[in-house]
């Protein structure tokens, strides 16, 4: 195969890998029973009119197994932080003492575990879509190379086959991650 095709396939593999890593990171934001500061990574706060990640507004820590504390850098942002947490899909009710926001993680009920499995499945589907979008973009590039006469149809077909194998491997990896996360969530 030509160097152009090799470069396209290497780029596709790299971008698909990054999509899987992003999905893995998003899995860390779904709680499984222990307090973990990464649970709040997806939370964004409307801070004076701009949407800001919670990590940039406060220090998040887990002093106990079922407690998260959020220490805002600016005390006036406490109400906005509480509002953002209430509007999120993490299912926790914040409480504050004027200085620190506390999130107590209750035992997960069977119903909440099923809701969290749905959240994880949605995250996985978003990851699959990202991988497929990479495949679609590279397929388009391969067609353009063929139409421009830079590669023959046999080379294009071989490259598409390689690309499909890479796509299938990444989607299988996402499915394995999903299964492991489901087991972790449903474990009592």
Image (cartoon, grey):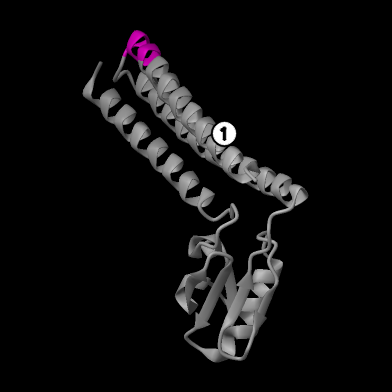
Say which residue label 1 marks: 179
Identify the residue at the far top of this view: 154
Q: Is residue 158 above or below residue 93?
A: above
Confirm whether residue 95 shows in the render. yes
Quarter location, residue 183:
top right
Query: Residue 132 at what x, y percent from top left?
Result: 51, 32
User: Residue at position x 40%, y 24% from top?
Assistant: 166
Whole-percent x, y for residue 31 in the image? 59, 55
Q: Front-most of 178 and 103?
A: 103
Secondary structure, mark 1, is helix
- Residue at 49% x, 78% y is 57
Identified at 65% across, 42% down, the residue is 186
Picture layout, residue 62 above or below residue 26:
below
Magenta residues, start to end: 152-158
Q: Residues within 10 Å of mark 1 (few under 14, many from 20)?
A: some
Q: Residue 88 versus residue 103: which sits nearer the camera?
A: 103
Q: Residue at x 51, y 39 (%)?
A: 130
């Amino acid at each position: 195969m030509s160097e152009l095709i090799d470069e396209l396939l290497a780029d596709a593999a790299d971008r698909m890998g990054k999509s899987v890593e992003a999905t893995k990171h998003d899995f860390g934001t779904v709680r499984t029973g222990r307090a973990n500061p990464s649970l709040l990574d997806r939370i964004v706060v409307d801070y004076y009119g701009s949407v800001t990640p919670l990590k940039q507004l406060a220090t998040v820590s887990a002093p106990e197994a079922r407690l998260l504390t959020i220490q805002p850098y600016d005390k006036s942002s406490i109400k906005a932080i509480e509002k953002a947490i209430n509007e999120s899909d993490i299912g926790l009710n914040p409480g504050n003492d004027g200085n620190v926001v506390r999130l107590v993680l209750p035992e997960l009920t069977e119903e909440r575990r099923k809701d969290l499995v749905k959240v994880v499945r949605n995250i996985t589907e978003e990851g699959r879509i990202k991988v497929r979008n990479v495949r679609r973009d590279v397929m388009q590039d391969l067609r353009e190379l063929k139409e421009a006469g830079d590669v023959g149809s046999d080379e294009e077909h071989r490259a598409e086959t390689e690309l499909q194998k890479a796509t299938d491997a990444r989607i299988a990896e996402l499915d394995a991650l999903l299964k492991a996360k489901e087991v972790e969530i449903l474990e009592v």
